[in-house]
Every structure is written in C-alpha cells, then in structure tokens.
Amino acid sequence: MEILRVENLTKTYGAGANAVNAVDAVSFTVEQGEFVAIVGASGSGKSTLLHLIGGVDRPTSGKIFIDGNEINHMNNDKLAIFRRRQIGIVYQFYNLIPILTVEENITLPCDLDGSSVDKSRLDEILMSFGLKERRNNLPNQLSGGQQQRTAIARALIYRPAILLADEPTGNLDSKASEDIMSMLKLTNKNYGQTIVMITHDLEMANQADRVITISDGKIVGEA
Ligand SMILES: Nc1ncnc2c1ncn2[C@@H]1O[C@H](COP(=O)(O)OP(=O)(O)O)[C@@H](O)[C@H]1O
Ligand SMILES: [Mg+2]
C-alpha cells in the first residue's frame, strides 16, 4: 500500500534572476512499511523537501498525498491537526521543550490535541526507547542520544502514517548514532513504521531499504 506520493513537487525561493528551485519537479512514492533514505550534498534541497512532505512548508507547485490525503488542499488549521496525528518529524537538534520532562515532551502532541494519553502506548514507547527510568528527567539531564530518543518517541506517540527524520544522527557521536539507527530500524521492522530519513552520511543511508539521491533539488538516483 502506498503511504506517500509526491508529484512534480517544486519549491522556488526568491524571484526573477534570484529565483532558486530548492526542490525541482520531484516525484516519488513510498510504500507502507518502507525505510527510505534521501541523500545529497549540503544545499541539495533535502530539508526543503522534508519540510514540504511534513506540511511544515507549502510547495510552489506539485502535490503531496499522505495515506491518500492531499495535504496541499488542507487549510492551516486542518493541516496542523493532520500533521500532529499522521506525520512524525525528528530534527538534528531534537527540538525538545526544556521545561518539560521526558514524559511531558513525549505526550505533548496529545496535550496540544486535547486528547487523553494512551497509557499503554506511552509505557510501550518509554520501554522500547529505554526511557522508562528517565521519564521524570528534564532534557538537560539527558545525553544527546537520550534526547533524540525522546524526540523520536514524541514523533511516534500517535502511530503516525509516516516518520520523517532530518539528519537524526547529525549531532551525535558514532556510538549514539548507531544506537539511534538501530532504534529506527527496530521501529521499522517490529512496528512496520514507514520512515523517510535524510542524511548526508552514506553509511547511515545504506542501512535503509532504498536510497534516493538528490542534487540541486532533483532526484538523480535511486537504489
Ligand atoms: N528560506 C529560504 N530562503 C531562501 N533560500 C532557501 C531557504 N531555505 C533553503 N534555501 C536554499 O535552498 C537550497 C536547498 O536548501 P536545503 O533544503 O536546506 O538543503 P539541504 O538540507 O540539502 O542542505 C539551498 O540553496 C538553500 O540556500
Ligand atoms: Mg538540511
């Protein structure tokens, strides 16, 4: 089953002679349960592409379907709710709320939604990410790897249709990076979580099922 479809997606920054197509007529699909890596040099348009797919930014033209829903057609309020429930996003620098505990950070999407927290889901996620003993700690009491695990747990609390990760190991040492990669792979294999991960690290990318290479905003290779 197709979980993501990107059709002729373009994002142009600037105008006239200064116009740059950060993403340039990109099309691809991702099946439910796939782990896809997107690689490319710095400035090739990876983060812009991920922000478009994640509904954080709007395309100049083209379409994005997530689980059959065309997200460009949603107004901002509807998109915000859809994003919170169906799209998990993880960034290089974790983006945790410093005054909230690990548990409060993980359940933040539910609180923003005004929905009650699924306690068994929370316990399962704290357990599988090795955060049970850390649930009452603040982010600054955690290692980088633990902070990123918290961010991934937050992204997964709602069992989103897709998990998007932008250089999730970019700020971590090699041991913590391997740890995060194995967590992502476990989530993919054991729970069938669809993942699209951006990286400039080929060693990380090659651990995915499929690698899409982009250059100057265009897909130049698929393997
Ligand atoms: N908000 C913006 N305004 C103008 N240009 C931007 C903006 N964001 C990104 N760009 C440009 O778009 C291109 C792709 O950037 P980006 O998606 O961040 O690449 P990557 O994540 O692969 O390093 C670069 O040339 C960058 O300078
Ligand atoms: Mg980037």
Image (cartoon, rainbow, N blue to C red):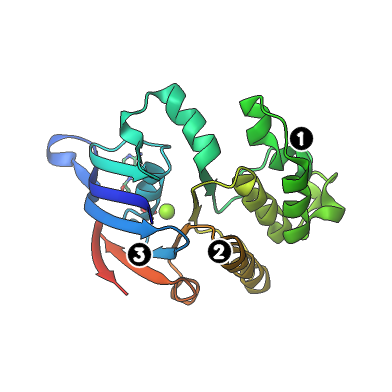
Picture coordinates of residue 182, whole percent (x, y): 62, 70
Task: Identify whether 67 is placed above or below 2.
Answer: above
| Residue, far left | 17
User: How many residues crowd around disc 2 within 10 Å: few (fewer than 14), some, or many (20 or more)?
Assistant: some
**Disc 1 to disc 2: CB gap under 8 Å:** no
Looking at marks 1 and 2 on the same chain, the residue that comes earlier in the sequence is marked by: 1
Q: Is residue 217 visible?
A: no
Local SS, label 1: loop
Which quadrant, please, contains the C terminus? bottom left
Q: How many marks?
A: 3
User: How many residues crowd around disc 3 within 10 Å: few (fewer than 14), some, or many (20 or more)?
Assistant: some
Residue 66 disc label: none
Looking at marks 1 and 3 on the same chain, the residue that comes earlier in the sequence is marked by: 3
Residue 188 disc label: 2
Q: Amino acid at mark 2?
A: Asn
Q: Which residue is mark 1?
A: 99
Task: Identify whether 208 is placed above or below 151.
Answer: below
Residue sitting nearer the eye, 8 or 11: 8
In this view, the mark in front (2 or 3): 2
Q: Amino acid at mark 1?
A: Ile
Marks 2/3: CA–CA distance: 25 Å
Picture coordinates of residue 212, whole percent (x, y): 33, 66
Quarter of the figure with residue 100:
top right
Residue sitting nearer the eye, 109 or 145: 109
Q: Which residue is mark 3?
A: 41
